[in-house]
Amino acid sequence: MKKIVFTLIALTTVVSVSFAQKYAYVDTEYILENIPAYQAAQEQLEQLSGQYQKELETIQAELEQMYNDFRAEAVLLSDEMKRKREDVIVSKEKEYRSLQQKYFGPEGDLFKKRQGLVKPIQDDIYNAVKEIASDGNYGVIFDKAGGLSMLYTDPKYNLSNQVLEKLGYN
């Protein structure tokens, strides 16, 4: 009998604790759109990306011209001259790929610049959400902007404006 009473009490406690969880959500896209520093960082990254892209397109055009010239003159060149031209073209292609990796690779300049400009803003948002969750006793706060499918959201559970206020915006 004691085991049954104890089991019922434990079950009731677990059920009541699970129902006591509070849930909310934020929309990080909305939050980021309302932070001027993020907008400035995005513009700066787009300019840098455009600059890198233009430089790579120039090298690509040079490569195409070199290759077209080589094809047009190949019948007139000796085997040694052909090899030299091919080596120059191959070396230019390697330079192109290396520069592309340097700018746009996983550890490239653009990635590092993005980390330097955007990561501090994201960290601030995370800390604000964490503080709001702690203050409001929220068990879970979802991100509406993420890959999570949220078919319906009640606006009263949207904490995005609170996050902006906590960050000093709005």
Image (cartoon, rainbow, N blue to C red):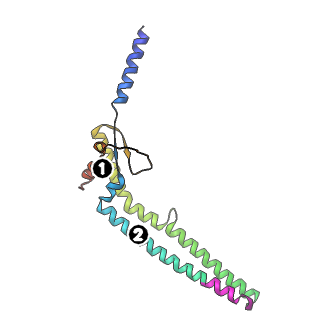
For image coordinates 42% across by 65% down, the residue present is 113
Mark pair 1, 2: CA separation: 26 Å
Q: Quadrant of residue 98?
A: bottom right
Query: Does 161 sit left or right of 98 as displayed?
Result: left
Secondary structure, magenta segment, majority class: helix
Task: Give yes or no for residue 75 being in the magenta stretch.
Answer: yes
Which stretch is magenta? 65-76
Q: Secondary structure at mark 1?
A: helix
Extreme residue in the front direction: 152
For image coordinates 54% across by 71% down, the residue present is 100
Query: Does 147 sit left or right of 81 as displayed?
Result: left
Q: Quadrant of the N terminus?
A: top left
**Dot 2 alpha-carbon crowd within 10 angstroms: few under 14, some 14 to 19, many 20 or more:** few
Residue 46's tag is: 2
In the rendered structure, are the residues bearing label 1 and label 2 in contact, judged by CB atoms less than 8 Å apart? no
For image coordinates 44% across by 75% down, the residue present is 51
Percent x, y for residue 105?
Answer: 52, 65
Residue of label 1: 160
Q: How many marks?
A: 2
Percent x, y for residue 26?
Answer: 34, 48
Query: Does 145 sit left or right of 137 as displayed?
Result: right
**Dot 1 alpha-carbon crowd within 10 angstroms: few under 14, some 14 to 19, many 20 or more:** many
